[in-house]
Image: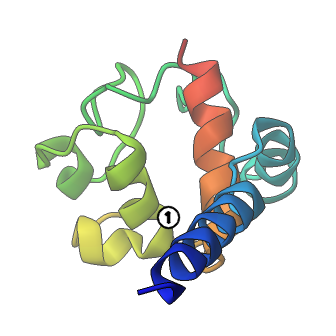
């Protein structure tokens, strides 16, 4: 029974370490956005500013794929993470041919998009 406090302490230490190590960084997300996304997107259009909480494919005057226009996906941290991981798996028939395989990069990009959605 004496080892229980030791395990609890180790678990809390690990949690603190990993939560800090994975804390999303909006400034890094902006750098990633500017280096990876800017070729096809800008924060203003296709309107990524305000994207969190908005229905996918709903900005006027943008040439979305039929799949994106028809989807019922609402952009949230979870759906953006799934989209950036594998856009075709989330919305089959979409036309974005790019993914972000690294979890930390996705978290930072999403944090930047969240900041720009306020």
Q: Write down the quadrant of residue 42 in the picture.
A: top right
Looking at the image, can residue 21 be seen?
yes
Instruction: Pick the residue in front: 67 or 91.
Output: 91
Residue sitting at 44 percent across and 59 percent down? 81
Percent position (x, y) of residue 76?
Answer: 35, 40
Residue sitting at 19 percent across and 57 percent down? 67
Name above or below for residue 78 compared with residue 112: below
What quarter of the picture does the N terminus occupy? bottom left
Residue lying at the far front of the rendered structure? 2
Looking at the image, can residue 95 be seen?
no
Residue designated by label 1: 84
What quarter of the picture does the C terminus occupy? top right
> What is the image's colouring?
rainbow
Percent position (x, y) of residue 38?
Answer: 77, 46
Q: Write down the quadrant of residue 90 in the picture.
A: bottom left
Q: Please state if 118 lies on the left or on the right of 67 as rendered.
A: right
Badge 1 marks a residue whose secondary structure is helix
């Amino acid at each position: 029974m004496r080892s229980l406090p030791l395990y609890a302490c180790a678990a809390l230490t690990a949690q603190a370490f990993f939560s800090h190590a994975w804390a999303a960084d909006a400034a890094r997300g902006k750098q990633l956005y500017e280096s990876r996304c800017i070729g096809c997107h800008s924060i203003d259009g296709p309107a990524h500013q305000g994207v969190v909480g908005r229905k996918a494919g709903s900005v006027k005057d943008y040439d979305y794929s039929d799949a994106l226009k028809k989807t019922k996906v609402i952009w949230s941290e979870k759906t953006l993470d799934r989209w950036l991981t594998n856009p075709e798996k989330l919305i089959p028939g979409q036309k974005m041919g790019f993914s972000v395989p690294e979890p930390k990069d996705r978290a930072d990009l999403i944090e930047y998009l969240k900041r720009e959605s306020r």
